[in-house]
Amino acid sequence: MPFMRKTKARAKTSVTEPTRNGLREALLGLLAIRPMSGYDLSRSYQRALQQIWYAPLGQIYPTVRKMQQEGLLNVAIEVQRDRPNRKVYRLTPEGKRLLVSWLSQPATLPNMHHEFIHKLFLLNHVDVKRRAVLVDGYVARCKTWASELRIIEKRLNASLSGPHAESAWHQLLSLQHLRRIVECEALSAQQIASDIRARPNPRRGRGQAITRRSLKPLEKAAFAGLSLSPAAGAKPDANA
């Protein structure tokens, strides 16, 4: 068994507010599964969380160092005979309390930059013949992603009888939720492509003409501050 030389966590600081990019909370969650080196953390984050909780991988090591300074992590030096020694991080009691506190807070609605919706909002600037084709491409990518997630689900099933079965089961639930979201994306985008193809060519002017007078209420709705998102800064109901 390799020798483990522990180093003390640095002085604790008051840490209560969730971080803006959520990377600290993601790393706390991964280390709650098992202690890991910085390299293991980076690989686990990339494989398990990056698709749903994006942050640049280059931020992982600086975030780990800051977490150690805040008293959330302890580090032990694992002495290896034929390879360089490595640092192994584990949660301190303060780190565990912070993770449980964050998990116990009501989840906020997604605050996203959804590129497909953004481009769909402006798709009238693209040649009318290409619009449905572009949406078809998004549908195909969603279906491919959903198929890949199903493969990962099957692999994760093998972990349900292992030493981390409880953690693996909740990982499977989160993975299934993501896969359903992706499938809904594909289904909705497929309907949008059909709607685009079924719409009369706007250049032919079929139907009632849109006059400046009839457009005015729509302008107010779309461009005068009416938001499509939940109220900025609104917090979820703790009793929900």
Image (cartoon, grey):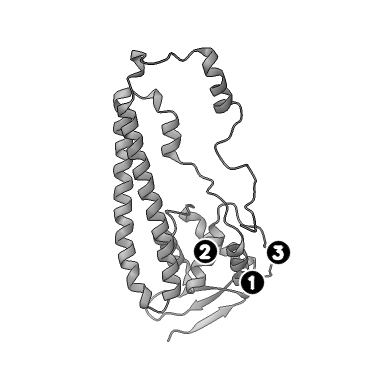
Residue plotted at (32% across, 19% down): 201
Above or below for 137 versus 204: below
Q: Is residue 224 above or below residue 153?
A: above
Q: Estimate the x, y position of residue 126 in percent, counting from the top left.
A: 36, 25
Image quadrant where residue 12 sits? bottom right
The image quadrant of residue 45 is: bottom left
Q: Is disc 3 placed on a helix, strand or loop?
A: loop
In 3D space, how far apart are the residues under numbered discs 1 and 2 (Cα atoms)?
14 Å
Classify mark 1: residues with Cα within 10 Å, few (<14), some (14-19) or many (20+). some
Q: Quadrant of residue 119?
A: top left
Badge 2 amino acid: Leu
Image mark for residue 27 = 2
Residue that numbered label 1 is attached to: 94
Nearest to the observer: residue 79 or residue 18: 18
Quadrant (top left/top right/bottom left/bottom right) for the N terminus: bottom left
For this orientation, the residue located farthest to the bottom is 1
- The residue at 60%/26% (across/down) is 224
Question: Is 34 placed left or right of 107 in the picture?
Answer: left
Depth check: 26 or 111 in front?
A: 111
Vertical comparison of 206 with 65: above or below: above
Residue at the extreme right: 14
Give the residue number, with chain letter if any, for mark 3. 14
Q: Counting residues from the N terminus, which is met first, the one under dot 1 or under dot 2?
A: 2
In the image, residue 82 lies at what x, y percent? 37, 79
**Mark 1: amino acid:** Glu
Q: Amino acid at mark 3?
A: Ser
Question: What residue appears at the point 61 percent right and 60 percent down from the top-left corner?
Answer: 105
Question: Quick one: quadrant of the C terminus?
Answer: bottom right
Report the side of 35 relative to 240 (left or right): left
